Amino acid sequence: MAKRTAKKTNSKIRKYRKPLNLNIGMIIFSVIFIYVVVCVIIYFQTSHIVRYEVQEGSLSTNNLYRGIVIRNETVVHTPSTGYVNYGAREGERVAKNDLVYVVDETGRLSQELESLNLGENTLSKKSLAEFRSELVAFSHDFDCTDYDAVYDFKYSLKNTVLKLANENMLQSIQNLGAGNAVSYSYAPRTGVVAYWTDGYESLQPQDVTEEIFEKEKTDYKKKQNMSNTLLAAGDAVYKLCTDENWSIVIPIDTERGAKLQDEEYVRVRFLKNQYESWGKTRLLVNRDGKSYLQLSFTNSMITFLSDRFLDVELIVEDEIGLKIPLSSIVQKEFFLIPEDYVIPGGADGGDSIMRQCYLEDGTISSEVIDTSVYYFDNDTKEYYVDSSMLNPGDILYKLDSQDTYTVSRRATLTGVYNMNKGYADFKQINILYQNEEYAIVKSNTRYGLSVYDYIVLNAESVQDDQFIN
């Protein structure tokens, strides 16, 4: 009986439900958290309009170029086989019929010369000055990345020393007599002597191609001749540079090359020795379809006699104007309206046009509407009018006349979106020059920009007349 009572008592027990206690702090935190999450989602899903303040400035353009040297060069070939000994120093100007080198056909000349007492060679003050100048110039311009210059310098000094030694040697050769199978070679014409060849002696400016500059990096070979070297008949023994006029041909952008050609002359700095000279400009479009600029000079040919390729800097004035990023630039289409059909001085001080309209009873009438003008072409005498104000086929009236004009022709302007008034207002720009990031545009134009204007940094982030917070 007791067991039944206990069982009955346990069956009536119910689980106690705790009352719902709302914590006001948790509610506020949850609302704020949800609000922040929604704001973050909206932020990443909407495009952001960033403004840019227009400033006056200029572009730093790359004016460094590598060009190929073009000279009037005549290569002289030896008529006989033998050991060549030079009697003229490289870079020395020789007259016609001056002795340049002798050929020892037997190879015994050097042995016979050694048996003679040639005496000691001493350097004059002039020769010492030449050596000192060459050493200082080389030390100043030495570049570890251009180690070939070391060999050019070595050959230059060696030829200078051999020139001094050869003065006594040539006199000794004459003392040995003509029976030693020694032949004398004389300059066929006046010119400056150079003892190296590279195969580009007959190159003309119009023959320069991009391939030449590519080969210069990997496959360019310069053959340097030295005294007491064995040459075969028909080998190139030296060359004569017969004209002080010379030129450099550089690859260049067509637009910039045309601008430099219009200026006729440009100041050029040679990076090898920082020497500056004025070069006459000529734009070339060669057979590879690329544009090249020929820079012609009338002096300093001897200074760069040992060089085929030179690095130069064009010293030009930078374009100064309003500096804007390329991301702000946009193209927009407009209707072309003749000057006589635009009425100056609208309701808000702007311009207006008189357009044909129809009344409720079908009668033809006219209405004056304000319009926005974005550009005026002085050549064609036409206004660029916002296309949203008109429709193709609209008929316009000339003020105080019965003449009409049917709207149809369109044209495109380059510009940016000005945001000074709180909305995206298109402004036409005139680009003077541009690089990969910025453009320099003309300032203070009638329909353009002024310094300190605010424009949209990314033109793709807005639409015409969009309000900007």
Image: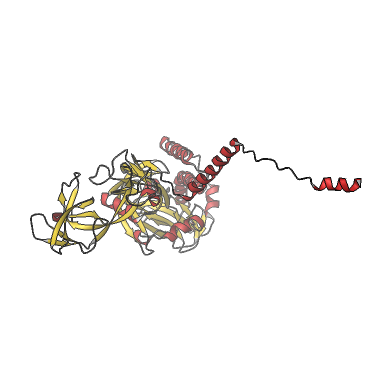
Placement of the C terminus among the 4 image quadrants: top left
Closer-to-camera residue (153/258):
258
Report if residue 126 is visible in the image.
yes
Picture residue at 52% right of the left edge, 43% below the top: 35
Question: Residue 168 at what x, y percent from top left?
Answer: 46, 45
Closer-to-camera residue (271/461):
461
Disc tally is 0
Direction from residue 273 to residue 365 in the image, left or right: left
Residue 28, relative to residue 245: is it above or below? above
Way the structure is coloured: secondary structure
Picture residue at 17% right of the left edge, 60% below the top: 357
Report if residue 242 is visible in the image.
no
Q: Quadrant of residue 28?
A: top right
Closer-to-camera residue (20/395):
20
Picture residue at 18% right of the left edge, 46% below the top: 347
Question: Residue 442 at what x, y percent from top left?
Answer: 28, 45
Closer-to-camera residue (333/371):
371
Direction from residue 9 to residue 431 in the image, left or right: left
Question: Residue 268 at what x, y percent from top left?
Answer: 35, 45
Question: Residue 348 at what x, y percent from top left?
Answer: 20, 44
Q: Quadrant of residue 443?
A: top left
